[in-house]
Amino acid sequence: MTDFDSSLVPSGDILIGGEWRQGRGAPYRSVYPADQTINAEISTADAEDAREAIEAADAAWRDANWAGLKPHQRASVLYRVAELIGARHEALAQLQRRDNGKPIGETRALVASAANTFRYFAACLETLDEDLTPSRGDYLTMSVHEPLGVIGAITPWNSPIASDAQKLAPALAAGNAVVLKPAEVTPLVSLALARICEEAGVPKGVLSVLPGKGSVVGDALVRHPLVKKVSFTGGTSVGRGIARIAAEKLMPVSLELGGKSPTIVFDDADLDHAVNGVLYGIFSSSGEACIAGSRLFVQRSIYRAFMERLVEGARRLRVGDPSRVETQMGPLISAQHRESVERYVALGLQEGGRLLCGGERPAGDGRENGFFYQPTILDGLANSARICQEEIFGPVLVAMPFDDEASLVQHANDSVFGLAAGIWTRDYKRAWRVARALETGTVWINTYKLFSISTPFSGWKESGMGREKGRLGIREYMQQKSLYWGLNDAPLPWAN
């Protein structure tokens, strides 16, 4: 390994049922997407490793050393995880950069987010109340919540440490054990986080981290009868497969899936804010974000002027070395993914689109050695075009003019996805109307792609089901139980 602290992942071992050892799967070679140099070679898990991890997790969960702790005692462990993430902030950020090629400024923000997530759910856990429900008879009624058991957490490659934290923190807070399956191509930071959790006091066996193929490890995790819930972030097709298996098991799932989010610019918008917000919404993270604002609707009266400014801004974006603080866009995750993005751009042109900027690989400054792609904007297409309907997961924006609010809402909602949207307008009444009319889980108004761990996040339609974040995010990993306390002095009369 080079260019980061190798002590975070000192060997090729993975965490299986509380033991750091070699997995039975084929070794995986982690590659830096910016120049294809080797980060590390690690072992991976197979289905048998998954079975062992799940059985160990079930035993560990049933041990009162975790689920039986008082809430404030579990919270103290989560606070310690947050402290250790903070103490190793820069090392983890550099590891995340090497893992998936994101610019260092972004990975630093992701590491800070992970620490905040553990800290937030620790605080929520300490203050989460149970309910004394209104009495309806000669008895006292209570509603309490208990852990589900073994949680399967499956996370994506685009923001590993933040995604890991958003599943691990509430699941552990609730008293569960977790088997984490990171994306095959980005295992390093998840393994580093597992070591931190161990050091913080998460008991042996309560957490396993199983790198490997989703079709092997993920499938074994979803199907195992001891796994009581799966929380998955990733593609819609895989999410459907998980939902089918969960239906057979009658198992709850949380699915955060794909998106094709509309960004809307009205003619009264502050154009300086709107241009910068649209650029950030689609091109930050190189467009590799489920909430990327990939469909742009601009009111026709300002369409030409706005697009000129937008294209000029896109051409100024700095695409290059992720280790440089000034870099705004790093490489895509792999050669195969870049080829997929290129095929979509070619398809858009075949469908009649007009290329306004980008559409090519940048050259010079060593970028030909990595998987870089220029920020790309097309227009001249109808919302029904495939490039407007299918998730590309890359730095590709399709712009379309609109005339009135009614047609705008119709076209914005004309998608199988419903994850996020953005609105740019000075008219607060219009913003309210349109935000409420959009069929999506999150709407940003005069901003974009800002997140708060205190605010629930979810997808509508084929963008998923279930909720992450928010104070009640812990409840997503618990099951409710009702208790009735008889207060009657005389025996129940029925048997007299």
Image (cartoon, helix red, strand yellow):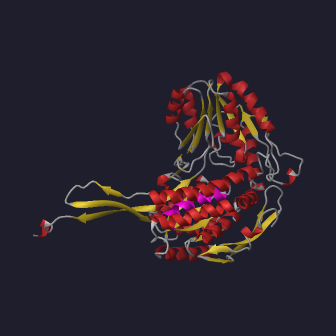
392 displayed left or right of 69 = right
Q: Residue furthest top?
A: 301
**Where, quadrant-wise, is the N terminus in this rendering?**
bottom right
Of helix, strand and loop, which mostly describes the magenta segment?
helix
User: Measured from the top left, where is residue 383 in percent x and y?
Assistant: 63, 35
Q: Which residues are magenta?
A: 160-176
- Which residue is the extreme one toward the left? 496
Q: On the image, which quarter does residue 107 sit in?
A: bottom right
Q: Is residue 451 left or right of residue 330?
A: left
Residue pictured at 71% horizontal, 65% vertical: 188
In the picture, measured across the screen, residue 154 lies left or right of residue 372, that is: left
Image quarter hosting the C terminus: bottom left
256 inside magenta stretch = no
Residue 66: percent from left, percent from top: 49, 72
Q: Is residue 123 left or right of residue 25?
A: left
Taking depth in this image into account, of 98 and 306 the one nearest to the observer is 98
Instruction: Please state the horizontal and vertical placement of residue 41, each as a whole percent of the image.
Output: 76, 70
Q: Quadrant of residue 80?
A: bottom right
